[in-house]
Image (cartoon, rainbow, N blue to C red):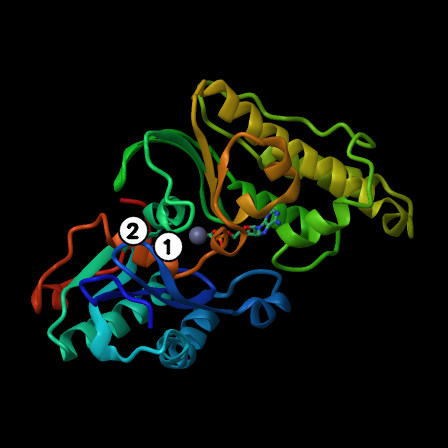
Amino acid sequence: MARDAAGVVILGLETSCDETAAALVSPGGEILASVVASQDELHARFGGVVPEVASRRHLELVSPVIRRALDDAGATLDDVSLVAVTVRPGLIGALLVGLSAAKALAWGRRLPLAPVDHLQGHVASLYLQPLDLEPPFTCLLASGGHTMILDVAERGRQRVLGTTLDDAAGEAFDKGARLLGLGYPGGRAIDELARQGDPTAYAFPVARVPGLDFSFSGLKTALLYRVRELRPGELEARRADLAASYQRAIVRALVERIEAAGADRVAVVGGVAANSELRASLPDAALAPLPLCTDNAAMIASAARYTEALPYPAYLGLDAHASVA
Ligand code: KG4
Ligand code: ZN
């Protein structure tokens, strides 16, 4: 196993939504293993994440996923020097599964535990090798739960410059996909279908709210009306054009806001950072590597490098929180 000179590794756990993930990362930011078990198929038939179903699945998956990460890295728990886990924001029951597993692992081996903020985790996906991005930069964080522009002054320290007033960009993708009959999660499905469509076929509104905030709920309603106006059977023929035009509107809203922030150096993270049109629209930005855009535990272990860890056994009373700090 590749290890830093100190011979220590960070075990990261992520269970805030519907991905059960474990990763081993060296203190220098090298990913030694990163395992993500997606629950997409489990939730697809409900058209979105069902919190109780997610918690139960995390319980089933968390141990095998950790075991797999250790095996992939050729490591054992003896190699782990720090346990890192997402403690906020997210689905409370889902967070508690990861936190309980992390406490048990850390306590059993007298290890310290780093409580990680999921959003800081997304930003810390940029600090992993080989990208290893150094602040300062302005970061667009666009995921299923959040859409923000952050001023990142240094690793582990950021300030919110703008946020969404209603839906997150990923949520807009997911709700749009549902209206178009593309299933859950919808971002990737829209991305793929949009390649076959005309992005200028429909003019969807881009909400202009003051400052650097975002709003996506009007866009979703506009798509609903366009779909309702279609004649019976017409959706099939118009679906790709609708997907392409809808995606164009979301990407434009994101790019306009990033440009309005007037930053010299821009970075993009979060599930929506995987979007091919968004990536192509920001050729000069530092983009989170594709496998690190959607939820994973390597980014959580990465963030732990810039988060104060609690010593054994001070973390036993630690709580998870559903909301942003
Ligand atoms: O970061 P993430 O895995 O979870 C949260 O922290 O929310 O983001 C998931 C979101 C979903 O809404 C999903 O539809 C969206 O990221 N997404 C995409 C793409 N891949 C994932 N949206 C647009 N284009 C994609 N290629
Ligand atoms: Zn996320």
State the separation of the CA atoms marked 1 and 2: 6 Å
> Which element is circle 1 on?
helix
Residue 154 point in image, percent of width and height: 26, 35
Mark 1 CB near ligand 2 (8 Å cut): no
- In the drawing, does residue 97 fall left or right of residue 55? left
Q: How many marks?
A: 2
Disc 2 residue crowd, few under 14, some 14–19, many 20+, Cα 10 Å: many
Residue 56 point in image, percent of width and height: 42, 76
Nearer to the camera, 8 or 184: 8
- In the drawing, does residue 110 fall left or right of residue 139? left
Residue bearing the label numbered 1: 299
Residue that appears at 69% across and 54% down:
189
The C terminus - image quarter:
top left
Mark 2 CB near ligand 2 (8 Å cut): no
Nearer to the camera, 89 or 67: 67
Q: Amino acid at mark 1?
A: Met
> Which element is circle 2 on?
helix
Asked whether residue 228 is in view, the answer is no
Asked whether residue 112 is in view, the answer is yes
Residue bearing the label numbered 2: 303
